[in-house]
Image (cartoon, rainbow, N blue to C red):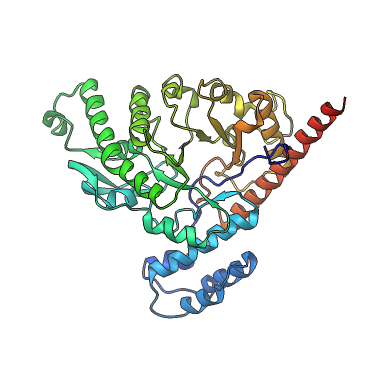
Amino acid sequence: MSSNGEIKFLTHEVGSLAKPPWLVKTSAGKPLKESDIEHAKSWGERLEVDGHEQLVELLRQDERDPDEIARWSSRYCMRLQESAGVDWIWDGEQQRSEMYAWAIAHSNGFEPRGTIRSFDNKYYSKSAAVGPVSLGEPYHNAEFSFLKSAAEHELKIPITGAYTLAVWSYDEHHLPKAGRLGGGLSRKDEVDARRELTLDIARNIIRPNLEALIALGATWIQIDEPGASTEEDELDIFVESFNVSVEGLEGCTFSTHLCFSDYNLFFPAIEGMAGCRQYCVGFANYDSTELGTSGADRPGYEVISKWRDLTYEPILGLGVTDIHTDFIESPELVRDRILYAVDVFGDPARIHVCPDCGLRTRSWDVAYEKLRNMVEGTRLAEESLNRAHAGASST
């Protein structure tokens, strides 16, 4: 609700955005083409990035500081979201190597074990826990401090959660030696080892990072858990690790992002996750692109009633744009998805609006149009609900 009592939905981005070619090539030590520099110039003008002419000059130099160029990319990505009208923003992972590798690189007790393919045909460097794990240094502080100094809208900062870091790692510390050497290993042994590693990461890596960010003024931290449903019989470990990470921490709202899966698997496990004040979940990927607000029209959103019925009444971060396609959702389609969710929940205050996931697989052109239409569709939903409320009040 707004201060005047009208319905207003909060909008926010979820995760990563594509890194521009001038950042990718600078980080790799490769020369730039004129088209790369033109990309920085044209987007700087389009988004009205203050001082973007300075970046253009930097990009023309033979020697470029990758960290400085990454900070410029952060400015561009924040302005992209702000220009689209998004309420709560961040920089889309411009200064991070990758959501798993960045965390592991700043932690103790891990060793690299090679590169493997992830779900979206990208690759990441997988590591093994080889001893007690701990935080090397708070690894989002410099990023958050810079973003805070440059952002015009409110900031939400995502951080990769303990369970995902554990399930995406090999465990050469907690697993019984027989299992590591290929001998007999029961499922109970595997689950017990995963619990130990996950809770060690929660206590010794995630929680200290959260404490450091709160001390710097972070008021909303999203704990990303794309690996949460990797093992159906380990969902209680995911829930316990979230609780251990955030329990007792004050002055900040904690939410989680759950990537594409069978969301029914999370119930009843997340009934014990009352410290999570918002679940950011992707639904558009499963939905029809036809207009309509009935259940038959919105098949991708059938499961949302389970979040409605959680006793601690969390907010649902409603994914309304599909990040796997260049299809640009119309504002009217976004509107109808929101109106359906409000009808199911019966309380618009428990609905926020966002993309399904990070938009890193989309070009900036596509991401910008998706976000802009998301915001416009949100305004259409607000207008529809406020007209209906005004009409009901006058009768």
Q: Is residue 26 above or below residue 378?
A: below
| For residue 70, side relative to residue 88 (left or right) | left
Q: Residue at x 43, y 64 (%)?
A: 24
Along the line of sight, the residue nearer the viewer: 45 or 262: 45
Q: Residue at x 46, y 32 (%)?
A: 276
Along the line of sight, the residue nearer the viewer: 83 or 293: 83
Placement of the C terminus among the 4 image quadrants:
top right
User: Residue 115 placed where, x, y %?
Assistant: 30, 49
Image quarter of residue 233:
top left
Placement of the N terminus among the 4 image quadrants:
top right
Image quarter of residue 53:
bottom right
Q: Is residue 265 visible?
A: yes
Q: Is residue 287 visible?
A: no
Q: Is residue 355 above or below residue 73?
A: above
User: Residue 2 placed where, x, y %?
Assistant: 68, 40
Q: Is residue 133 above or below residue 265?
A: below
User: Residue 271 placed where, x, y %?
Assistant: 45, 21
| For residue 138, side relative to residue 393 (left or right) | left
Along the line of sight, the residue nearer the viewer: 314 or 305: 314
Q: Residue at x 44, y 46 (%)?
A: 158
Q: Residue at x 41, y 57 (%)?
A: 143
